[in-house]
Amino acid sequence: MKIALMDSGIGLLAAAAVLRNLRPDVDLVLSSDPASMPWGPRTPEQITALALGCARAAAALEPDALVIACNTASVHALAALRAELEPALPVIATVPAIKPAAALGGPVAIWATPATTGSAYQRALIRDFAGPAAVTEVACPGLADAIEHGDDAAIDAAVAAAAARTPAGTAALVLGCTHYELVADRIRAAVAPTAAAHLTLHGSADAVVAQALRRVADPTRRGTGTLTVLHAGRSAALPPAVLLYPQGLDLTAPAA
């Protein structure tokens, strides 16, 4: 089985690590375009064009499914990707985990890129799935870019700024950008002092992977555990920054 994941950069590590842990045999294709980061400030048309480029490069390697491991691309490019690639290639989007976060009943904060925060897409998810829970959207400018480059000082500054805008008593925090899952522990530590006693963080990687495995025509077919990395459609290596994050270490660890 071969599954491709696409993102602007290393945000796809979270879902890729979950896949590798669940199915060490799966052949992974990681397609991104880090030179074009960040995608958030770009127009929807530009984001769609970049996402299509990453998706086409991955699709050329004939995967069994394609995961859009990027919230911004899911917001702006999902329809175009599905129109071009399905039904031959199942396309799985990343959706912020608003429904399970709101189900806990307490106040919810959604951390996301400026492009996703306040978008019609995210507002519709809040309307449809948040129920009576109080929801605060928190834009996190610069955080994804800092994570991409492994810039500790910039990560700390962006996390602290977002934490300061997160209401006291927040009980559930939705990580609305796949990059943020790579620094979940640092986000928790920054928010915890003013959060509810039992703060929960909600990423998307587990749900996205489960959906991808459901969409594969033959999930029992085994691969050989290969890892293919594409940057703007060209063969590449994982950047050194991936080793700064637990998911990157999981993905690059020798097979047992």
Image (cartoon, grey):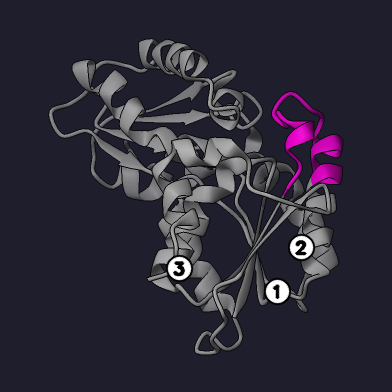
Place of residue 215 in the rendered image (x, y in percent of width and height, measured from the top left): 58, 76
Q: Is residue 139 left or right of residue 132?
A: right
Three-letter amino acid code of the residue under disc 3 = Ala
Q: Look at mark 3 in the image and give the residue it sits on.
A: 210
The answer to whether marks 1 and 2 mark residues whose Cβ atoms lie closer than 8 Å is yes
Q: Is residue 156 above or below residue 67?
A: above
Please tell me which residue lies in front, 188 or 117. Answer: 188
Mark 3 Cα within 10 Å, few/some/many (few <14, many 20+)?
Answer: some
Q: Name, please, the residue furthest toward the left.
A: 197
Callout 3: SS: helix
Callout 2: SS: helix
Q: Is residue 55 left or right of residue 23?
A: right
| Residue depicted at 54% across the width and 73% down the height | 225
Q: Look at mark 2 in the image and give the residue it sits on.
A: 58
Residue 214 appears in view: yes
Q: Is residue 246 left or right of residue 147?
A: left
- Check residue 63 in the rendering and tell me which mark sits there, or answer none: 1
Mark 1 Cα within 10 Å, few/some/many (few <14, many 20+)?
Answer: some
For the record, the magenta segment spans 32-50
Going from N to C along the chain, the mark reached first, 3 or 2, is 2
